[in-house]
Amino acid sequence: MRTQPHVLGIVLAGGEGKRLFPMTADRAKPAVPFGGAYRLIDFVLSNLVNAGYLRLCVLTQYKSHSLDRHISQTWRLSGFGGEYITPVPAQQRLGPRWYTGSADAIFQSLNLVYDEDPEYIVVFGADHVYRMDPEQMVQQHIDSGAGVTVAGIRVPRSEATAFGCIDSDAAGNITQFLEKPADPPGTPDDPTTTFASMGNYVFTTKVLVDAIKADAENTDSDHDMGGNIIPALVEAGMASVYDFKDNVVPGATERDKGYWRDVGTIDAFYDAHMDLVSVHPVFNLYNKRWPIRGAAENLPPAKFVQGGLAQESIVGAGSILSAATVRNSVLSSSVMIDAGATVEGSVIMPGVRIGRNAVVRNAILDKNVVVNPGEIIGVDRERDKDRFTVSAGGVVAVGKGVWI
């Protein structure tokens, strides 16, 4: 006998992630490595699985090979109780066309909804870094009787112009959904903060299906969840807001409670990594009661030889630091750093090789980058601009497999 409502999870993982180039030159944004041992999609999948939601469809589109492989190899469920996590590519079920927006992705995949026949549908984005218990949001949605519930995170009103913003009344009913407004609305209890949409939604199934079908017939629509579906349901008086600060995650500390980051740019991606490496991190990867699950590679432990040193850093399995110094950095698996090299304030992805006496500062090196002996990165900004991508914040980003 079912003791919980029947919930289907749909994870939207089809975005190109252009602002995160060159990290997305060869992979979908949700497949970008993060935190030394994970991919971005692992955060949303961990949240859903930890909450007990085990029927999940991941809608993919652009450069999805590595994402599909990661899901199939890492997120295998037994299936004994009907559970599954499955990548679903654009199948052109309705004609020879790709998804034209996030709402169209669901419209073209309605067969998944009909097959599962859930009471509620959780629609979450695939490329944010956070912990959340979705079950609490689902329960509020059920209790409120709303057609859709939108997760909102409180941000300073002065910074809210970069987000889709939620205007709500004291009862939690959404009165307006505004895309990057010049004058963001305050929250009912604090005029200095604004509810920014987290891109996470809970729908009553019939409400979503009806809205998706109506949107598909509208030739003026961009077929976007945040741009079209949610505003239409707000106008119909069927939308409510879920305050993310009310979400209680087991094992969370006061320091990392309510943490959420949109890592859609190089600078945001870099800053989120720097949040991981302090003694008392802003985001704690070591919460055993709400684990972030990733690929379990069969690798030996990290090794430090000939005085190799890492301070305020994360070092992945299989890495070897030989008479090298690493500070305030995140190193993924199988990173090799030779004698005399220095790495500071950097994000180093799997398989990177850094040669003798090289210097890497304020940089992101993608998988399998090779830094030749004596090379200097992140010191001479003008020289770096001639060779690599340099963000507005001065972070040097080097694409996958580059030899320097």
Image (cartoon, grey):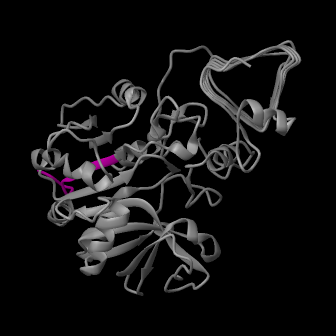
Residue appearing at x 23%, y 75% in the figure: 145
Residue at horizontal 55 percent and vertical 61 percent from the top: 258
374 to the left or right of 244: right
Compared with residue 260, is residue 235 higher up or lower down, i.e. above or below?
below
Q: Residue at x 10, y 44 (%)?
A: 115
Q: Which residues are magenta?
A: 1-11
Q: Is residue 239 above or below residue 115?
A: below
Q: Quadrant of residue 208?
A: bottom left
Camera sees residue 52: no
Q: Which residue is at a point 38% across and 43% down the rendered structure image? A: 13
Where in the figure is residue 50, as x and y percent of width and height? 38, 46
Quadrant of res 254: bottom right
Closer-to-camera residue (361/121): 361
Q: Which x, y percent locates residue 193?
A: 58, 78
Q: Could you say which is closer to the camera, residue 218 or residue 143?
A: 218
Q: How many marks?
A: 0
Q: Is residue 87 left or right of residue 285?
A: left
Q: Can residue 94 be seen by looking at this rendering?
A: yes
Provide residue 285's location: percent of width, then percent of height: 59, 42
Split into 4 quadrants, where in the image is the C terminus? top right
Q: In the shown orientation, is residue 122 left or right of residue 324?
A: left
Is 4 part of what is drawn in magenta?
yes
Q: Is residue 208 above or below residue 61?
A: below
- Between 323 and 239, the residue placed more toward the observer is 239
Q: Is 362 contained in the magenta span? A: no
- Where is residue 300, by image quadrant? top right
Q: How far across and how far down the image is residue 270, in percent?
A: 67, 44
Q: Is residue 16 left or right of residue 224?
A: right
